[in-house]
Image (cartoon, rainbow, N blue to C red):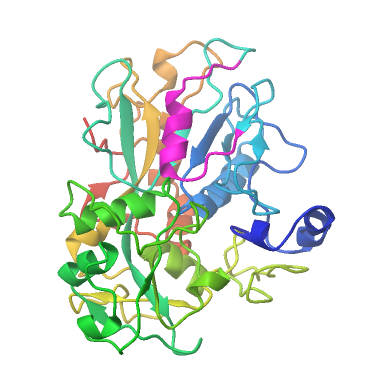
Amino acid sequence: MRMLSKFLAGSAAAAAMVALAAGPALADPPSGKTPRATDAVGVGANTDEYLFDQVSNDFNAKHKTSKNLFYSWDATNAVTGALGDQIETKATCPTIARPNGTGAGVSALETNTTDPSSSRNYCVDYARAAANPSSTTPACAAAGGLCYVDLAGDAVTWAARTAAAGGTDAPASLTVAQLVKIFECQVTNWKQVGGKSAPIEAFLPQTSAGTRTFFLTALGGGTTPITPGACVSDENNTLEENEGIDPILNSPEVIFIFSVGDYVGMAYHSASCTNAQCTGNPACAPTSKQNQFGCNETGVLGLGEIAGKKPLTSSSPPKINPGFPLGFQRSLYDVVRYDPGTTDHIPGAESNSPGAINLEQFFSAKAASTPGYFCANSTAQAAIKDYGFLPTWPLGSCGEIANP
């Protein structure tokens, strides 16, 4: 529930914790289960948080006696939707404000806070990232480096209100140049870009969101992000990425942005919300054939075309269109600390003392033993598809390092 904090407060939030128990499987480590020092724990991006919840659930169910179980903290509170609540990532670690988004997740990883119970282990082991490494990201080449490990393929496009929700003043397709002008506030009326005569209401997610960073960088040609103009709002840095259920977006004049993969996972593989704000008892009730984590939070929004290219295929259910403009396709990443003792530099068992965390078993495609769970396990590969992303894509390959 990514935005319940805007609808629940005080005792209502406490009641929701009980009420939502009957709905979809809740994210974060399960109630009563606090990760150990040797468990792999991650934070970060909103975009693939539900995929990680599913993989955590599946892996841990099959490896109950493993010294390295797998856990993932959502970008917002899984029950109340609160932003920045305190979380205890591992049993003996100090609490921290929940990292919300790629930027906050990578920053939490970079703090290198060690678990007080074990100098060999960290309180955060990996970060989920939905934006490419920047020019200032320390390369995966030496001590202190960060390794961006390819996980899956995705794309990002603009979004506007669907016909079913009342329609939009925007045209069906926008060029890159038109999108730049809209988000730089050089164009302020939809008529100027082929739409109806109506003012444009441009919105972006909060600043730590990887989807925001990626999209603005794509508009800047792939290297330098454009700077949003004063007409663009992120609701005082509180608007969550990849959702269309915030009432502020329910206008024919709105333009927002959305992960295409996340949209596919929610709109075509997840249960419908029981009301417009995705609250209630339960918020949604998935069947055994639907995604067990997350509800359909696409709300009033549908995906727009870029330069006449549709973001989705015509298949049923649709997938990310491989012909979508390449500059708006992206990789999702697992970000880990550089390890000098492994071939791929993902922290691995062969270079660590007994009990230390082996992340190769989850993320690597070149591990000394069995390839990583995400890249090789059929259940994990099926989950990647069910949550809308691409196991194979033109910009990377699962388990490869993007910034050597």
Q: Is residue 271 shown above or below 34?
A: below
The correct choice, above or below, for 339 with respect to 168 in the image is: above
Q: Quarter of the image containing the N terminus? A: bottom right
Name the quadrant containing residue 150.
top left
170 lies left or right of 92:
left
Q: Is residue 329 visible?
A: yes
Q: Can you name the residue that lies furthest to the front here? A: 230
Q: Is residue 390 left or right of residue 285?
A: left
Q: Report the span colored magenta.
A: 97-115
Q: Residue at x 22, y 86 (%)?
A: 194
Q: Residue at x 57, y 44 (%)?
A: 56
Q: Is residue 142 above or below residue 395?
A: above
Q: Quadrant of residue 373?
A: top left
Residue 204: x %, y % from top left: 40, 60
Residue 140, image x, y percentages:
26, 26
The quarter of the picture where residue 91 lies is top right
In this rendering, the count of numbered labels is 0
Of residues 397 and 93, the one nearer the viewer is: 93
| Residue 232 point in image, percent of width and height | 37, 62
Determine if the magenta segment contains residue 107.
yes
Q: Using the rendered image of the protein, determine whether residue 127 is visible from the camera's viewpoint.
A: no
Q: Does 99 lie within the magenta span? A: yes
| Image quarter (top left, top right, bottom left or bottom right) of the C terminus | top left
Could you tell me which residue is drawn at 48 percent across and 51 percent down?
237
26 left or right of 315 in image = right
Q: Residue at x 15, y 54 (%)?
A: 221
Coordinates of residue 29 in the picture (x, y in percent):
66, 41
As drawn, 282 above or below 135:
below
Q: Nearer the viewer, residue 22 or 378?
A: 22
